[in-house]
Amino acid sequence: MNELPTFLLDGEEVPFQPGQTVMQAALSAGRYIPHLCYHPEFTPHGSCKVCTAKVNGRTVATCTTPAEAAIEVESNTEELNELRRTLVQMLFAEGNHFCPSCEKSGNCGLQALGYDLGVMTAGFRHLFPDRPVDASHPELWLDFNRCILCELCVRASRDVDGKHVFALGGRGLEKHLIVNAESGKLADTNVAVSDKAVEVCPVGVILRKRAGFAVPIGRRRYDLSPISAQAREDAPRPMEQRHD
Amino acid sequence: MADDFPDLEARVRRIASGWGHDPARLVQVLREVQEDCGYVPPRALTLVARFLRLPFSRVSGVASFYSFLHTEPRGDYRILFSDNITDRMQGNEALIEAMCRQLWAEPGKVAGDRLVSVGRTSCIGMCDQGPALLVNGRTIPALTEERVRQVSDLVLARVPLGEWPAEVFVVRDNVRRADLLLGQSLNPGDAIRAALQRGTRGWSEHAANERSWREAYVGTARGPVATLEEIKRSNLRGRGGAGFTTGTKWEACRHATGLTRYVVCNADEGEPGTFKDRVLLASHADLVCEGMTVAAYAVGASQGLLYLRGEYRYLLEHLQQVLERRRAANLLGAGICGQPGFDFDIQIHVGAGSYVCGEESALIESLEGKRGVPRNRPPYPVTNGYLQQPTIVNNVETLCAAALIAVHGGDWYRSLGTLKSSGTKILSVSGDVARPGLYEYPFGVPVRQVLEDCGALGTQAVQISGPSGICIDPTEFERRIAFEDLPTAGAFTVFDASRDMFEVARNYTHFFAHESCGFCTPCRVGTSMLVGAMDKIHDGNGSQHELSEMARLNRVLLMSAHCGLGHTACNPILDTLKRFRPAYERKLRSLDFTPAFDLDGALARARQMTGRDDAAAHLGSPP
C-alpha cells in the first residue's frame, strides 16, 4: 500500500486521504482543532469560523479547506486561540445562554469550547434577544435562546431524515431557526423523536420533554474530559441513512 | 388575514405557472406575489411551496432573507427612503419626518388602517439626484419638500400608483464626461457581427460550409477563440471592483467541462454611491446585451441571466422591450445573425434587496432561488456556477467594454489607460460637488482632476469605491484611479469641510450590519458590535474602550469573515480614524470606560409617574 500524503499541523506530520479536509484529517489523526458547526457525519459548511487556522500563512476555515500534501497549518497558536475566544464570546453575547439552568450543561459544545479556550466573560455587551420557546410539540421542545445557528439540525433533517423540518429565516443578526410549518410551530411539522435532527444539536435548543438530567451533572461528556481531548470522537464517519 | 385575498390560490397558481413552476425561480415568484398582493401572506408561502414543490421552510427562509419581501402587511403604499450618506447630506431626514407628519405615520410602522408605511433602505443608486425613495418598488428621485407633499397627497387620496404624474418618476442620466463607452454609437448587432467575422477570418471555405460553427472551432484556433484572444489581449479587468482579468475568467469557463454554460450579468449595483450601471442599463441596454452575447459566443454558452437589483425594478419593462426587439432582429434566440448553432437568450432576474448578492457566488445562489449567501470557494463559478455548471459572472460595465473590444480589438482598448489598467472607468460622482453624475476617464486619472471637473470645493475627503473601498484626504488627491493605485467599482463620493467624517463612517457601519447575510459568526455578530460601539460614541458615551474594541473586531473580521463584506466592514472606521481622528476624539469621554447605560435617564419614567423632578429624584449626571 502506498504511504498516505501528509501535511504539517503545528509542526507535526498529519497523514490524509485525498479528498479529506484539513479538519477531517486532523481529527482522524487524533489532533484537535476547535470547531462547532463541523460534524463528522455531515458535509462541512464553514459558518462558525471557530476552526479558522493559518494554512501557508493565510487564515481559512479548516473544515472546508481541502488537505494538500506539504501544506503548513498553524492552529494551536495564541493569535488563533484569541480569535476563537472572541468568536465564542460573540456567540455567548448573541444568544441567551444560562449554563446553570440548561439541561445540556456538560454535554454542550459551546460551553465545553468556552472552558477549553479559557473564556471567562462574554466580552461584549449582551444582546439579550427575545426568542420565545416553542413547547408546542408533545415530546420535544425548542429553546431558541441557545441557538448558535450551526445549521446541523437543518443539514440532518434535509440530508438524513429527508424532511426539511428545520431551516433558517431572516438575515444578519435577525437570522434565526425556523420550522417547516406555516404556523411556525414544531407540533405542526412531521418531526419524530427518532430523527437525526433531534440528536445532532450541539447546544441546548432541541430537547426531549420529560427526559431532563437523566445523566447527572458531573458525569456528562465534557465533565469527564475536556473537548480538546476528544478529537477522535469527531473523526469522520459515514453518514447514517435513515429515510423511512 | 387570510380573508384579504379570497382568490389567493388562483393568484399564486398563475404566477407560479408563469415561471414554469421552476423552483430556481423562487425569488421571482415571491417578488411577483408581493407585487400582486402588496406583501407575501403566510398562506401564499404555503401555496408557493406547493406549486414549486419545495418545503415550506425553504420558501419561508428565502422570503425572510430579502429586505424587500414582507410576510406581514406593510400598507397599500410602501415607502422606503434611500438612506445612503449622500441622501443624509441632501436632507432626507427632514423629509422623512415631514412625510411621516403628513401621513400620520411612524417610521417603520404601518399607519392609517394599513394605508401606508414609511421606512428606510440602503442606497438605491440615485446619489446624483437624491434624496430619493421607492414607493412599491418604483423610484422617485430628486425629492424636495414640495415633492414629498405631493407624494403624501397622492397617498392620502389613494391614487393608484399607475395614475401618478409621470414626472415624479423621471430619472436623469447626468452623463458629464463621456469617453469611449458612454460616447459609443454602435448599432445593435455590430459587436456580434464583428465577433462572428473575426471568427471566420482564416477559416477554410470548406470548414465553414460543411460544419457548424461549434464543430468548426474545435480543431482550429479560430472561431470564438479569436474573440477570446482579443479580450485577453485587451487586458480588460472586472469593473465590479475586484479587477479579475476578464479573459482569464472566460477562458477558464470555456475550458471547464459541463452540460452547458451560463453568462451572468451582475447588475446588482449595491455599493452605496455607485450608479453607473443604472445609466448603462437605461441608455445603453443594447450594448449590455451585446456584451453578454459576445461573451456567450466566446465561452460557448446558450443561456444568459441578467441579475437586476431590486432597486432598479423600474428598468425591468424597458429591458424586456430591448430583449424583445433583439429577438425580433435575430440578435437573440436561435441562429443569431444567421450563424447556425449560435443560440443564446437572456432572462432577467430581479433582486429583492440584498447587497451581499453582488458577490458572485451569493448572486448565483439567489439566481437559483435560495438565500443569498456566498458559497465556499473553491470550486469557483467558472467551473461550478449556476446550477453547478460553468458560469461567468461579469459586471455590466465589463460586458459593455467587452462588446467594444469585439468591434475594435484588444490593442485598441489597451492603448487607453495605464499599463496595468487598460481602457476607461466610469465614475459615479456624488456628494459635495457642483455637477454630480457620471464621469468616464481613461484609467490613471488623478483624483484632483476629477474633483476639478465636477466642481468640488473645499473637499475634505473622497470615499473611493463606496464603504468597502478607501477614504482619502487632500494629501492623497494626486493618487490615481487605477487597479495599481486606487481600485474602484466606480463610487466617488465627495465630502467638503462641513461634513462630520465620523457620521460618514457611522452611516456606512450601519449599512454593513444591515446587509450582513448572517452566515458566519464574525460578520453576523461583529458588524452589530461595531454599530453598537459607533452609536455609543455618537451618543456621547464613547471612550478609549470603544476604539480598542473596534480594533479588536476588525482583526476578527479580517481573519475569519466568510466573504468580502465582513473583510471590509471595518474599513470606513479604520480609514476615518487614521485620517480624521479628531472627529472621533471630540466625541470621546476621557475615561477608559463609560457604560452605555444612562442610569438617570432610566429613572425618567419613574419621575414622570411620581410627578417628581426635584434634585433628589435625579442621580448625579455622568462625569
Image: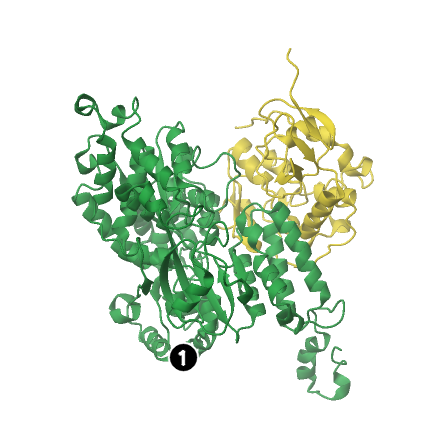
Chain colours: A yellow, B green
**Residue drawn at (71%, 60%) of the image:** B548
Q: Residue at x 63, y 40 (%)?
A: A58
Residue B177 on image: x %, y %: 33, 62
Quadrant the C terminus of chain B occupies: bottom right
For the residue pair A116 and B128, the one nearer the viewer reads as B128
Judging depth in this view, the residue of A27 and A127 nearest the camera is A27
Q: Is residue B558 left or right of residue B187?
A: right
Q: Quadrant of residue B87?
A: bottom left
Spot occupied by residue B235 in the image (x, y as percentages of width and height): 40, 42
Query: What is the crowding at mark 1: few (fewer than 14 residues within 10 Å), some, or many (at least 20)?
Result: some
B227 and A115: which is toward the camera:
B227
The image shows residue B481 at horizontal and vertical percentages of: 45, 56
Q: Quadrant of the N terminus of chain B?
A: bottom left
Q: Is residue A109 above or below residue B124?
A: above
Extreme-bottom residue of the structure: B614
Q: Chain of mark 1?
A: B
- Residue B595 placed where, x, y %? 73, 68
User: In screen coordinates, is B467 left or right of B9?
Assistant: right
On the image, numbered disc 1 is attached to which residue?
Answer: B102
Instruction: Tell me the residue at 19%/33% (across/down).
Output: B339
